[in-house]
Amino acid sequence: MTGATSWDSPSAIRREFAHLPPASIIVTGDTPGIDAHAKAVAVEFGFTVSAMKKTNADYRAFPGEGWKGLNVRMLATGIDLVLGFHADYGKPGCARGTQHAVELARQADIEVKIFTE
């Protein structure tokens, strides 16, 4: 999972989680918005949640941008799908964290689906 800290539509997450297999594991970060909603909706579906947090090592590797380290680590878990939820995805200067995660996923040949609403 990746997306906006201001994301406020759990229904969009529910819509996409409904297409996932019952034994899915949701790997998400530690922010409000998309991560908080993803955790709650995953529990509704009975999915396992792997909630990851930014670490000091993330901030050392990417000074001032620890989220990049978190993105790298989340993708290294072996995930096979990235769902991105960000209303401003694709707009210049916006959705930097989501764009970073998507770029890393595509480089690793991981399927990506982006939702702007």
Image (tube, grey):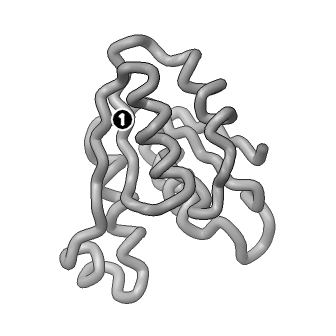
Task: Name the one closer to the observer, 108 or 44.
Answer: 44
Q: Is residue 89 visible?
A: yes
Q: Give residue 41's position: percent from left, percent from top.
A: 49, 33
Q: In the image, is residue 29 above or below residue 56? A: above
Q: Quadrant of the C terminus?
A: top right
Q: Give residue 27's position: percent from left, percent from top.
A: 36, 41
Counting every numbered tag in the picture gives 1
Q: Residue at x 72, y 77 (%)?
A: 93
Q: In the image, is residue 74 above or below residue 67? A: above
Q: What is the quadrant of residue 45 in the picture?
A: top left
Q: Amino acid at mark 1?
A: Ile
Q: Is residue 99 visible?
A: no
Q: Residue at x 33, y 15 (%)?
A: 23
In the displayed structure, does residue 98 sit left or right of residue 115?
A: left
Q: What is the quadrant of residue 99 in the picture?
A: bottom right
In the displayed structure, does residue 21 sit left or right of residue 9?
A: left
Task: Name the one closer to the observer, 5 or 60.
Answer: 5
Q: Residue at x 44, y 12 (%)?
A: 21
Q: Residue at x 29, y 81 (%)?
A: 59
Residue picked out by circle 1: 79
Q: Residues within 10 Å of mark 1 (few under 14, many from 20)?
A: some
Q: In the image, is residue 35 above or below residue 80? A: below
Q: What is the quadrant of residue 47 in the picture?
A: top left
In the displayed structure, does residue 14 sit left or right of residue 93?
A: left
Provide the secondary structure element on which disc 1 rests.
loop
